[in-house]
Image (spheres, grey):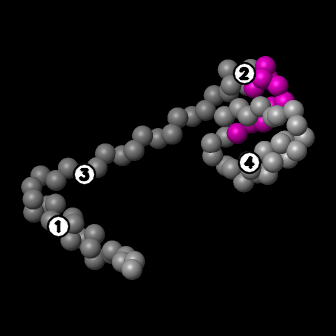
Amino acid sequence: MAWVYSTGIDIRCCTDVALYNISTPVVALFSDIASAYSWLCSVKFKAPPLPTAKPVYRNQQELKSYVSSLSTNALYVY
């Protein structure tokens, strides 16, 4: 993400504070739109990995086995 600063110094400070601890998505700060546009056109990011497929159970017994294995490790919060 390209973030173009406001011209107001007080707003710039608030922006810095708000974005200080953000690690994702990548936020690059710019003073002008042309620089932000140029950066966006040139930067290359690796796409996030696709989620893995969920297992397919051949029959109801396999599914029941899987569900019961989950319940033994379940965490209950009240």
Depth order, front residue of 5/60: 5
What's under tag 2, amino acid-wise? Tyr
Residue at image x 63%, y 46%? 24
Residue under the image location 72 percent in, 54 percent down: 21
Around disc 2, counting alpha carbons within 10 Å, would you say few (fewer than 14), some (14 to 19), or many (20 or more)?
A: few
- In space, the residues marked 4 and 2 are separated at their CA atoms by 19 Å
Q: Which residue lies under the disc numbered 3?
A: 55
Closer to the chain start, of discs 1 and 3, is: 3
> Which amino acid type corresponds to the residue marked 4 in the rendered image?
Leu
Task: Label 3, secondary structure: give it.
Answer: loop
Q: Earlier in the sequence, mark 1 or mark 4?
A: 4
The reply to whether callout 2 and callout 3 are in contact (CB within 8 Å) is: no
The picture places residue 45, in percent across and down from the top left corner, at 61, 32
The residue pinned by badge 4 equals 19
Tell me the tag on residue 38: none
Give the magenta part as a residue range: 27-37
Q: Which residue is mark 2?
A: 37
